[in-house]
Every structure is written in structure tokens, then in C-alpha cells.
């Protein structure tokens, strides 16, 4: 190729110059066009731009449902309409306010106040002026679409819980996101979003909460819709499957019968919580729309502390339930002989002070050995044992058995309780430990505090030989975290036999015996005030003892543990034990029904049991799919 | 031949103008997308610019004569690629324009544009006369016409039309005769009604709305109207970066690409437009200057081919934004977002640099 070697040929310079003029001409022509639009006709286009407004209306995503272990709905949503006030055009807004106030029957001052308070918010962000619109409101808005274009209806999904605070502490409740939460969410949450405030609603908020969608419409200068832009659909939240058994929850709620206290039922083999009750309870439905500040104040200042989830947050002296920890410590440490036998005259003298047994008025238990001490809950025996063990050994075993630390349940605010020790007293009070304090701790008094949940975990773990599965409310297929404190077979056998005696050998919970069930447990009655103090103040219900009972079945490798606290219930035997009995009875009834189903199938088909088991399962499933009708308790969802 | 690619031969002025336009582009892409699902697009564009810069440096090192030598092969390759697009291409936005190459999806017609520039530069470079003879004119027309027809089949009217100015400017510089020019114009006028029937319905619609935009403010005329509102409401000083209601509100269609000039006009005002258009003018005039100093005819035609394409893009794209041209989907070089288009510009400018670097040879 040689076309470039002969470049002597003159390049067409004049034609290139013409192209240059053409370029200048084109740019000049374009600039002229911009001049015409941007300088000459600018005002006209500015007006047109003003008329272009975009209105953004959120599409609220429904939260995920909560289902019980058999797939029954515990918490769901219902559709509702809220009234939005669109604030794109401030001048017009003022003009419309009186008509809106009248039409929606909101006091004009209230409305004006809300509008004024929203001054600093961006103009395109609509204001929710009525969270729950009545049919009359909807009719009003629909019929005034043209003359009141600043009103818009928004479909929202309100949370629906069982009424009267059924399971309210476990489920928690939702509410408008706080400013701090918005701040901390990295832009994921926006003001006005509904988020879980407590309980599972908060724990699993990320899973339950969906992503809101958005509808963008073009509106003209008076706010009338003239076109639609893109729409992004809402992504609903995911449902969560709980370990709660609705039937047991119903029984537990019912058995507590309005008394202050808590019931926790769990399966110690897996750590699954079967029921969780705390009374008194707020009705979370009241929070679902928006709670008036007076009501909120009342709930917060209520002496009965209805917002406290007693199951995981009430830190109270465990009373005699603690004797099971003591009994385990005696057998495991071997610091006190198992053969220890003492005489109980109704009191004992330690370190120059008289400590009473609960049988003080009846003249004492007489001769008491290990088994009788647990069955009859003899205080004097455990005073002596505590003295011999010493506080450090007691606190060591209490901690190893799960007390004084959080169980790790999947709830946002769990308390750890307290296991006192010499070191603790020095650190917190800068005082030495007095030996007399050990005597109180030995029967679960003094500074010792536990939550009902902790006691369920501890007693279940002991009866299981020292395996403590982390309690949880969300069903999981993964391995449940656990901690182990392996106990000698002899220890487990001896302690569980004693707990069997408590219920079945005329012990403190003999009245709660269940026919055909190895129902075991331990009562507790914890004082809130010393006997002398009681006399001084003159008693009163406020200082009546708390009643405890932790029961389980069967005796070895239990399937269910129920921990019951009845505040001011006076006696564990009469106030608390029957509650646990009712729950465990229901548990076995359900199990029996399942068993019956099995036997019927067996007779009909007469094949090897293994395959029958497989066949029987769907039958059980079908049974459980029956509609939730808790009419027996009067806690059904109202028909809305 | 002596290698003379020292730094003072490099066209630093041209590079400075390109950088200035790229900066404006990044700023406007950022402003247009920051509140949209496309946020962060300016980073991707910046990556394309970086890649383009490397391409530019590499291409400026390769003697353009080497490239011109390969022109026939490249031309055949281009035709093959266009046929491949029609057969295997992926359909995006209703037209087959994309071919998956090396995992990325490239718009083949961008590359074809470049090859036509090269092919025509070689062809006109070999014409030894100051006047273009009729046989040569017909040859040039066929060379341009075949790929043009293939691109039209995609269908991509915009890119197809871009080939025309390369041929027209080339023919003009090669000394087309008046009688031939007039004859061609008459022929084109006669072809127009015939071509109208060959257009797709949406193409007809676009041209109709271009002629009478007010009749359909919610359809295709809507885009032009919103673009004009954006430009007009910007006024002389503009509304400020990130503060144009037309741009931020999403009224301006594809405001980060085809209509980026509308977004710019709204936010930076007539002042910003003036600066931007003067930069484009400087770029084009600089190209003409480089063409004047080119060592041989082929080099000059190469540079002017690039200038013709860029100038045509500028006219059609900016004209569209202010309602002087129909909506064609032709991006604004260096300003609009887009990988293939950006690479094309840098490749083309690389060749221009190359021609300049070799201007004093022999």
C-alpha cells in the first residue's frame, strides 16, 4: 500500500475552512435555541415546571404473621384506612382546614396544631391526621375528592393480637419508630414507620417487617392527579413460626386467672418455650393504632407494672425452689454427707440468731433426713446444709446450674437475676460477707433473685442430668445452643425422687397430684419482708409472700417443665402448684389424643408400627388445622 | 520513517477539553441519579472514562496507516458483525442492537461507525483528483449504504443516520461536483415518501410528534415537552446542582443519558449551556485544525470523519433537547452515560491524536 507516500497532493484547505464555519454555525444555532427557551420564554416554562408536581404515596407492607407450633395464627393483621393530609401546597392547606375538621370530626385546633408541628417536615411528606378512618370518614373523603384534593386515603395493615393481653409479653407490640431508631437504622427506617417495640415483635422486627412500596403520581397545581409515574409494590414481611403451643398458652393464661404473676412452660429437651404468660398484661391492640399519652403514662406508672414481662424480667427471691439447687450442691460437692439428719423443732440457732422454719407454729418437722427435707421443705435442714457448704460453694453451683445469668432467650430484654457471693458483696457494697446471710441464701431468700424462666431452665436441666438447652420462642431447625454441667447419676436420681415426693408422697404439693403422670416439682414461698418488719408495718397484701412452683413430668428426662410465679400468692402449694398441674394435664391430654389416634390406626390397619407412625402423622396434622376457637377462655379474635 | 511521538506532539488542548466535558458529565450524572435506584452511576461512568483513556493512549501509539491497511478486512468484519446482530443479537428496548462479547454486552453499531470512518478515509485518501468523479461517488455511496441498510434493519435509525454525515463531509472535502450534489438531493427528496413507509410505527410517531408536539402531551410528545420545560425553567443562571425540579422529580426522561443536556440546562442555566457548547465547539474546531495539519489526505479524512460523527451527534442530540430535532435516541458524546458510546469517542480521539503525532513525518 502506498497511498500515503504521494502526499504532495494539495490538501483541500479552503473546504476545511468551510466546515469550520459550519461548526460555528451549528453551535450558534443551538445556542440561539437555548437563548429562546431560557431567556426569552423562561417565565412561561417556569410556570409549567411549577405545575409539575409529584405526589408520593406510600404503599404499606403488611407485617409477617406469628404462628404457633402447629401453624395456628397468633398475631396477624387487618386492613384499615388512615387519612393523609397532603401538604404540597401550604397556602391552600390553611383554606381547607375548617372543612376538613368538620368533615372528619377532628377539633380544628387539634388539626391546626398538627399541621403547625409538621412545618419543618419536607412538603412532599404527607401527614397522617386520622390513623383509623370510620366508614363515614371514607364516604366524606370520596365525595369531596374534587373540592378537598388535599385528602388522601392510605390503606394500612393494623396489627391484630388476641384481646385482653393474651400472650402479650411474648408477642410484644408495635408502634411508631422513635427518632433514635431512625437514626440508628442507616436509612432503613423512616419516620412514621411501624416497628416492633418489645417482645418478639422487636426481636424479629427485621424478618417481620416488609418493605413499603411507593406510588408516584403527577399532580397539577391544584393537587389533582393527572398521571402516574412508576409504582413500586410493597414487599410483605415474612411470618415467624413460634414454639408456643396455643392450647397450653390458653390453659396457662386461664389458670393464672388474673392474678399477678407468670407462667413459663418449656420443653427441656429442646429449649422450646411452649407457653409464656405474664399478668397483668396490657392489650397490645391498644398500641396498634396509637396510644394516647395519658394511657401510656398510666401503664408506666402502674404499681403492678403491666409492661414488665415477668417471665423473663421479674427478679424475685426463689424461696424454697432454691432448695433443689442446694440439694444438688450437697450431693455433687460431697461437702455435706448425704446421710445428714437433723432435728427440726421449728427453728434453728445460727451465729447467735434464731432462724425459723415454716413449721414454727406447728412445732417443727421433727427428725429430718435429705429426702424428707426436700419433700416437706424443711428450712432448718437447709440452714444447716448451707452453713456447712458455705456461700462460695452455693453460688458456684447456683451459677453452674443456670442462675445469676441470662438464659439467652430470644427476647429483647431479659434479666439475669442474682446469685450473691462474697466477691459480689465486696464489689457492690464494699462490705464483708456475714455468715448469717448464707443461712438466708440457703432457702432462696436474702439477695438471691431469679426469674421464672431461669427456674424452668434450671430445674429442667437438673432433671435432665445437667444439659441446659437455651430457651427460645422461634422454631428452629438448627442446633440449639446449650451449656452442660454434668451431674452424677446418683445425684439426678436422688433429687428427682425427692421432687417426685413433693407431689406424690404427701409433700408440699400433694394436692396437685395427677393420676397416671409422673408429675414432680418443688414449691416455694418467698418472703418480701422479714417477719419482724411485717409485724412493725402490720402486714397488708403488698407484703404477702410470693408463691412459686416449678413442676415437670415425667420424673426422669422430662418433656415439659412449668415454672409458676404468683405474686403475693402466699403459698406455693395452694397458689402456684395447681397452675403447673393444669398446664401439664393439658399437655398429657393432647399427647393422649395423639396416642389414641395412633392406636385406632393400629387396630384398623394391623401393620408394623413404624409405617403406622408415618401414616398417623397427617391425621394429627389435620386435627391441628382446626380453626382456632378459644371460646372456652373467651379470648377469641373478635369478628371484624 | 522517524518515530516522533514526544509529549509536545500530543494534543494536550484536546485532552483538556475532553476532561472538562467529562467532568461536567460526571457532575450531571451524579445530580440526575443520586436520589434514584441508579445512584452511583457516575462511578461507573468514571470507570468507562478511565478505560477510554487507556484505549486512547494505546490507539495513539499505533500508526494509523497500519489501521488503514486493514480497512477492507475491518469493513468485512463490520458487515459480518451487523449480520450476526440481526441473527443472534439480543433484543433490548425493542431493537436488536446488542451482541454479548466477552461477557459484556456491546453495541455493535458503535464499532461499525468507527470502521466506516476508517474505510471512507482510506477510500477518499486514495482518490487522486481534486474533483470527485461520479464512479468514485457511487463507490463511496455503496460503501456507506450497505452497513447503513443493515443497521436500519435492527432497527436503529439514529445510528444509521450517523453514517450519512461521514460520507457527506468526506464527499464534500473530496470535491463533490455541484451537479452530483444537486442530483443526490433530488434523489433523497424522491426517496423520502418511500422511506416513510419503511419506518416502524414508533419511528413515525416520533417524527409526527416532533412536527406537532402539543397534540400528544402524554405520549411521546411528553418527553420533548418535559425536556423543554426543564430547559426553559432553568433560566439564565439555573436552579443549582441537584435542585432542578424537572430533573430531580424525574420529569426529564433518561436524564442521565440522552436528555442529560436538558438536566444540565435546568440546573446550570444558560450560562452552563454556553460553557458546555463552547467546549464542544472548541473540540470540533480543534479537530478541524488537526485535519488541516495532517500529513496526508487519508489522515485528514480520518480526523474529519470523527469530527463529522461528533458534530452530527451534537446537533441531533442537543437539537432534540430543545425541540429542534425529533427523538432519535442518539446520545451526546462525552456527556451521556454509556459504556459503548464513551469507548467509541475515546477510540476515535485516539486515532485523531495518532494523526497529529505523525503530522511532521517526512
Image (cartoon, coloured by chain):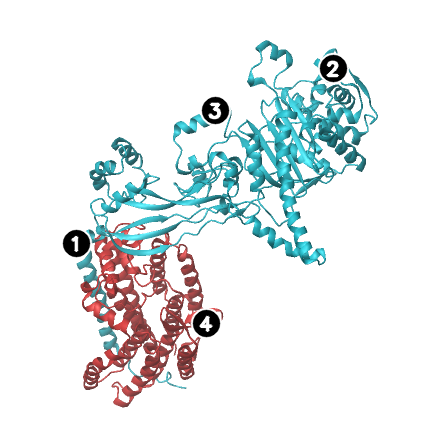
Chain colours: A cyan, B red
Number of the label disc, if any, that sits on residue A302: 3
Q: Of label 1 and label 3, which has the lower sequence position?
A: 1
* Spatial CA span between label 4 and label 1: 46 Å
Q: Are marks 2 and 1 in contact (CB under 8 Å)?
A: no
- Which residue matches tag 1? A44
Chain ID, mark 2: A
Q: Are marks 4 and 3 in contact (CB under 8 Å)?
A: no
* Spatial CA span between label 4 and label 2: 93 Å
Residue sitting nearer the eye, A15 or A506:
A506
| Mark 1 burial class by Cα count in 10 Å: few <14, some 14-19, many 20+ | some
Kindly indicate the quadrant of the structure image that contains residue A368.
Answer: top right
A635, above or below B15, in the image: above
Kindly indicate the quadrant of the structure image that contains residue A245.
Answer: top right
* Spatial CA span between label 4 and label 3: 70 Å
A329, above or below B348, in the image: above
Of circles 4 and 2, the one toward us is 2
Q: Secondary structure at mark 2?
A: loop
Q: Position of residue A344 (x, y in %)?
A: 77, 17
- Which residue matches tag 2? A346
Residue sitting nearer the eye, A441 or A620:
A620
The quadrant of the picture occupied by the C terminus of chain A is: top left
- Which residue matches tag 4? B100
* Spatial CA span between label 2 and label 1: 100 Å
Amino acid at each position: 500500500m502506498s497511498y500515503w507516500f504521494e502526499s504532495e497532493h494539495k490538501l483541500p484547505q479552503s473546504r476545511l475552512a468551510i466546515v469550520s464555519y459550519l461548526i460555528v454555525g451549528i453551535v450558534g444555532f443551538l445556542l440561539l435555541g437555548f437563548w429562546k427557551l431560557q431567556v426569552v420564554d423562561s417565565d412561561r416554562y417556569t410556570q409549567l415546571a411549577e405545575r409539575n408536581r409529584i405526589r408520593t404515596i406510600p404503599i404499606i407492607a403488611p407485617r409477617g404473621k406469628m404462628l404457633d407450633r402447629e401453624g395456628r395464627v397468633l398475631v396477624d393483621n387487618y386492613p384499615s384506612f388512615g387519612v393523609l393530609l397532603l401538604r404540597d401546597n401550604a397556602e391552600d392547606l390553611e383554606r381547607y382546614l375548617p372543612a376538613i375538621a368538620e368533615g372528619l370530626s377532628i377539633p380544628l385546633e387539634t388539626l391546626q396544631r398538627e399541621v403547625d408541628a409538621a412545618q419543618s417536615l419536607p412538603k412532599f411528606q404527607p401527614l397522617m391526621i386520622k390513623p383509623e378512618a370510620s366508614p363515614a370518614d371514607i364516604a366524606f373523603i370520596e365525595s369531596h375528592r374534587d373540592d378537598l384534593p388535599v385528602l388522601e386515603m392510605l390503606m394500612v395493615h393494623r396489627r391484630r393480637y388476641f384481646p385482653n393481653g393474651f400472650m402479650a409479653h411474648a408477642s410484644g407490640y408495635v408502634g411508631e419508630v422513635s427518632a433514635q431508631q431512625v437514626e440508628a437504622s442507616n436509612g432503613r427506617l423512616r419516620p412514621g414507620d411501624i416497628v416492633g417495640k418489645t417482645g418478639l415483635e422487636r426481636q424479629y422486627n427485621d424478618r417481620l417487617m416488609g418493605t413499603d412500596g411507593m406510588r408516584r403520581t403527577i399532580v397539577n397545581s391544584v393537587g389533582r392527579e393527572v398521571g402516574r409515574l412508576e409504582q413500586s409494590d410493597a414487599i410483605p414481611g415474612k411470618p415467624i413460626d413460634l414454639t408456643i403451643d396455643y392450647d397450653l398458652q390458653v390453659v396457662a393464661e386461664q389458670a393464672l386467672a388474673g392474678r399477678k404473676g407468670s407462667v413459663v412452660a418449656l420443653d427441656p429437651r429442646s429449649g422450646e418455650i411452649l407457653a409464656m404468660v405474664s399478668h397483668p398484661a396490657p392489650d397490645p391492640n391498644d398500641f396498634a393504632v396509637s396510644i394516647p399519652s395519658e394511657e401510656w403514662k398510666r401503664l408506666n406508672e402502674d404499681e403492678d407494672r403491666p409492661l414488665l414481662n415477668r417471665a423473663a424480667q421479674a427478679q424475685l427471691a426463689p424461696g424454697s425452689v432454691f432448695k433443689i439447687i442446694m440439694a444438688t450442691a450437697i450431693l455433687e460437692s460431697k461437702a455435706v454427707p448425704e446421710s445428714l439428719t437433723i432435728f427440726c423443732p421449728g427453728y434453728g440457732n445460727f451465729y447467735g440468731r434464731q432462724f425459723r422454719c415454716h413449721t414454727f407454729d406447728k412445732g417443727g418437722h421433727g427428725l429430718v433426713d435429705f429426702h424428707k427435707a426436700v419433700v416437706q421443705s424443711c428450712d432448718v435442714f437447709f440452714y444447716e446444709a448451707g452453713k456447712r457448704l458455705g456461700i462460695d460453694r452455693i453460688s458456684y453451683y447456683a451459677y453452674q446450674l443456670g442462675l445469676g445469668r441470662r438464659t439467652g432467650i430470644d427476647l429483647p430484654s431479659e434479666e439475669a437475676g442474682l446469685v450473691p457471693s462474697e466477691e459480689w458483696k465486696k464489689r457492690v457494697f464494699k462490705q464483708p460477707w456475714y455468715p448469717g446471710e448464707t443461712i438466708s441464701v440457703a432457702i432462696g431468700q436474702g439477695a438471691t433473685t431469679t426469674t421464672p424462666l431461669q427456674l424452668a431452665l434450671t430445674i429442667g436441666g437438673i432433671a435432665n442430668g445437667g444439659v441446659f438447652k437455651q430457651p427460645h420462642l422461634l422454631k428452629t431447625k438448627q442446633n440449639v445452643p446449650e451449656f452442660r454441667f454434668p451431674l452424677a447419676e446418683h445425684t439426678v436420681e436422688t433429687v428427682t425422687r425427692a421432687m417426685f415426693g413433693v407431689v406424690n408422697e404427701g409433700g408440699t404439693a400433694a394436692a396437685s397430684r395427677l393420676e397416671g403422670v409422673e408429675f414432680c416439682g418443688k414449691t416455694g414461698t418467698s418472703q418480701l419482708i422479714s417477719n419482724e418488719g411485717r409485724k412493725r408495718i402490720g402486714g397488708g397484701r403488698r407484703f404477702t409472700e410470693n408463691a412459686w412452683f416449678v413442676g415437670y413430668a415425667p420424673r426422669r428426662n422430662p418433656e415439659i417443665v412449668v415454672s409458676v410465679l404468683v405474686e403475693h400468692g402466699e403459698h406455693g402449694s395452694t397458689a402456684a402448684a395447681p397452675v403447673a398441674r393444669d398446664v401439664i394435664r393439658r399437655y398429657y391430654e393432647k399427647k393422649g389424643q395423639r396416642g389414641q389416634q395412633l392406636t385406632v390406626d393400629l387396630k384398623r390397619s394391623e401393620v408394623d408400627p413404624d409405617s403406622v407412625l408415618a401414616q398417623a402423622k397427617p391425621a394429627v396434622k389435620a386435627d391441628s388445622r382446626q380453626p382456632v376457637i378459644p371460646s372456652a377462655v373467651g379470648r377469641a379474635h373478635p369478628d371484624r | 520513517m522517524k518515530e516522533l511521538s514526544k509529549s509536545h506532539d500530543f494534543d494536550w488542548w484536546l485532552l483538556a477539553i475532553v476532561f472538562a466535558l467529562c467532568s461536567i458529565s460526571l457532575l450531571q450524572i451524579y445530580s440526575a441519579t443520586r436520589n434514584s435506584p441508579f445512584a452511583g452511576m457516575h462511578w461507573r461512568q468514571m470507570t468507562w472514562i478511565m478505560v477510554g483513556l487507556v484505549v486512547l493512549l494505546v490507539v495513539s501509539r499505533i500508526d494509523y496507516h497500519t489501521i488503514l491497511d486493514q480497512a477492507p478486512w475491518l469493513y468485512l468484519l463490520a458487515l459480518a458483525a451487523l449480520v450476526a446482530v440481526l441473527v443472534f443479537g439480543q433484543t433490548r428496548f425493542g431493537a436488536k442492537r446488542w451482541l454479548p462479547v466477552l461477557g459484556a454486552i456491546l453495541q455493535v453499531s458503535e464499532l461499525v461507525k468507527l470502521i466506516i470512518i476508517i474505510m471512507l478515509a482510506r477510500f477518499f485518501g486514495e482518490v487522486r483528483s481534486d474533483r470527485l468523479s461520479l464512479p468514485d461517488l457511487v463507490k463511496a455511496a455503496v460503501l456507506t449504504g450497505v452497513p447503513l441498510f443493515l443497521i436500519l434493519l435492527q432497527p436503529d435509525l439514529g445510528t444509521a443516520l450517523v453514517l450519512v454525515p461521514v460520507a457527506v463531509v468526506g464527499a464534500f472535502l473530496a470535491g463533490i461536483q455541484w451537479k452530483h450534489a444537486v442530483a443526490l438531493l433530488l434523489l433523497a427528496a424522491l426517496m423520502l415518501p418511500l422511506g416513510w413507509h419503511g419506518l416502524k410505527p414508533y419511528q413515525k410517531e416520533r417524527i409526527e410528534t416532533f412536527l406537532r408536539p402539543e397534540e400528544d402531551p402524554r405520549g411521546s410528545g411528553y418527553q420533548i415537552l418535559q425536556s423543554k420545560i426543564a430547559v426553559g425553567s432553568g433560566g439564565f443562571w439555573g436552579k443549582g446542582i441537584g435542585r432542578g425540579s424537572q430533573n430531580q422529580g424525574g420529569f426529564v426522561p433518561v436524564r442521565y443519558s440522552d436528555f442529560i443536556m436538558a438536566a444540565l440546562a435546568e440546573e446550570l442555566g444558560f450560562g452552563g449551556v454556553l460553557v458546555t457548547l463552547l467546549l464542544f465547539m472548541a473540540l470540533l474546531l480543534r479537530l478541524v485544525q488537526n485535519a488541516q495539519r495532517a500529513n496526508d489526505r487519508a489522515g485528514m479524512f480520518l480526523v474529519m470523519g470523527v469530527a463529522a460523527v461528533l458534530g452530527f451527534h451534537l446537533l441531533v442530540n442537543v437539537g432534540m433537547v430543545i425541540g429542534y430535532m425529533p427523538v432519535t435516541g442518539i446520545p451526546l458524546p462525552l456527556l451521556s452515560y454509556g459504556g459503548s458510546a464513551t469507548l467509541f469517542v475515546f477510540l476515535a480521539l485516539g486515532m485523531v491524536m495518532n494523526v497529529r503525532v505523525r503530522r511532521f513525518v517526512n
